Image (spheres, grey):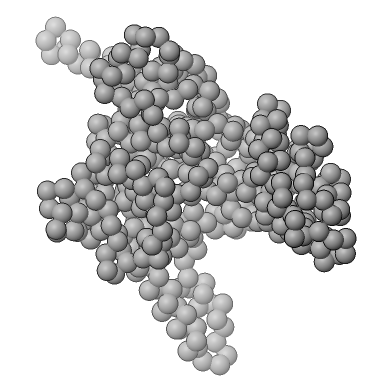
Amino acid sequence: MRFRVENLGPLREAEVDLAKDLIVLTGPNNTGKTYLAWSVYGLHRPRSQEVASVLRGDPVLEAFVASDREDLDFVATPPDWNGILGRLAENYQSALPRVFASGPESFGQAKVSLLWTTELTATFSERATSNIRGQFSELSGLNELHRDMRRIHLARWLWRALFPRCILFPAERIAVNIFARELALNRTELVSELLEVDVGTNPAEILQRRAGRYAWPIRDSLRVANDLAELAKNKSPYADLADDLESAVLGGKISISDLGELSYAPEHAKDRPLAVHLTASVVKSLASLVFYFRHMAKPGEFLIIDEPELNLHPDNQRKITRVLAKAVNRGFKIMISTHSDYVLRELNHLVMLSDPKESVARVIDELGYDRESILAPEKLGVYLFNEHTAKPVPVTVDGFEVETIEREIAALNADAQAIYAARFG
């Protein structure tokens, strides 16, 4: 599926292929990477009632809803996927101001398009047919109530088949980890104030004065940060990825304190855990990702990470890139935005190491790479944001090049040579 936006923030137009397993957004500052990423996140937020209304426009799905059949064979009778996605995209446009917590005037010219890619039709149809079989055994019947139930049930299933659960780790994650409790307290105080207002006082005025507006990614991150104690009761099958981050990057363990807050115990002082606000910036930056892999992660989910290299030394930037590549190979879909040459070069290494030559296999072991982190080039989609658009960067087994970064590195090297020549020439 391709996601296309027009006239969104600084973007005149941009299109990304959401079928890619690892999507990399890169380019200069203020070119629209966050706009694109947050728009993708908003698209994946559950809206099954909206889908139920969209299904009414497709004859294949409506015929199934009106029947008492238990199976829907998408291979033999595929729905009009582009028609469905077109109606979903049109509906989603109206939600953009809420995604960004902004007024509608900022998105009056914005346009969203969703395009079904032909090469994915067979793969999706086969998976969908096998997953849906038997799910309607208790929802047979031809009266209107059963038809509504079948339509809603189908819409919920179809939503998750098209848009897996998406988790976004914003660049503001450090502030979220530190101040989530304080912000929750402020909201509690606001509710108390509203309950105590004098007759004749306009509650809307208090709300406008006191209540901050948060974009969906920030609001959802705050919600998770305030529910850590409950979420920590869950155990994820991907806890080994949390272990990888802790051992390779953090040098210690992330846990939840008695107060329900993130804490960190360094390897050299396991018995003296620190509240997250007392830890190094690298811990503050990655603690929520570690918690996600240990307690929240489920198969096939979609992660969006804004600047995974945030506050990381170059060696740790390379290490987290390998962990994220390993997660991709374990079935996660991941989108990152990055300015890091170290992240991009490490991705290049992981792609080039997919070459099946025996000499390449030997160097994998010699350099200490984990084979579970090696990336096939077709899994990677790289997009360069510049001049109000996003251009796809070709990716082959030889890797890829991001021209803006390569140009800046060349300029840096040329300056270094000129400075050296002036001093010692």
Residue placed farthest to the bottom in the image? 199
Residue visible at 86% across and 45% down in the picture:
59
Residue visible at 37% across and 60% down in the picture:
232
Quadrant in which residue 146 is drawn = bottom right
Image quadrant holding the C terminus, namely top left
Residue visible at 52% across and 48% down in the picture:
166
Q: Position of residue 315 (x, y in %)?
A: 25, 31
Who is closer to the viewer here, 131 or 272?
A: 131
Question: Is 302 situated above or below 384?
Answer: below
Q: Position of residue 9 (x, y in %)?
A: 56, 43
Who is closer to the viewer here, 409 or 338?
A: 338
| Residue 34 in sight | no
Q: Position of residue 7 (x, y in %)?
A: 63, 40
Q: Position of residue 365 (x, y in %)?
A: 28, 19
Image quadrant holding the N terminus, namely top right
Horizontal side of 379 relative to 134 (left or right) equals left
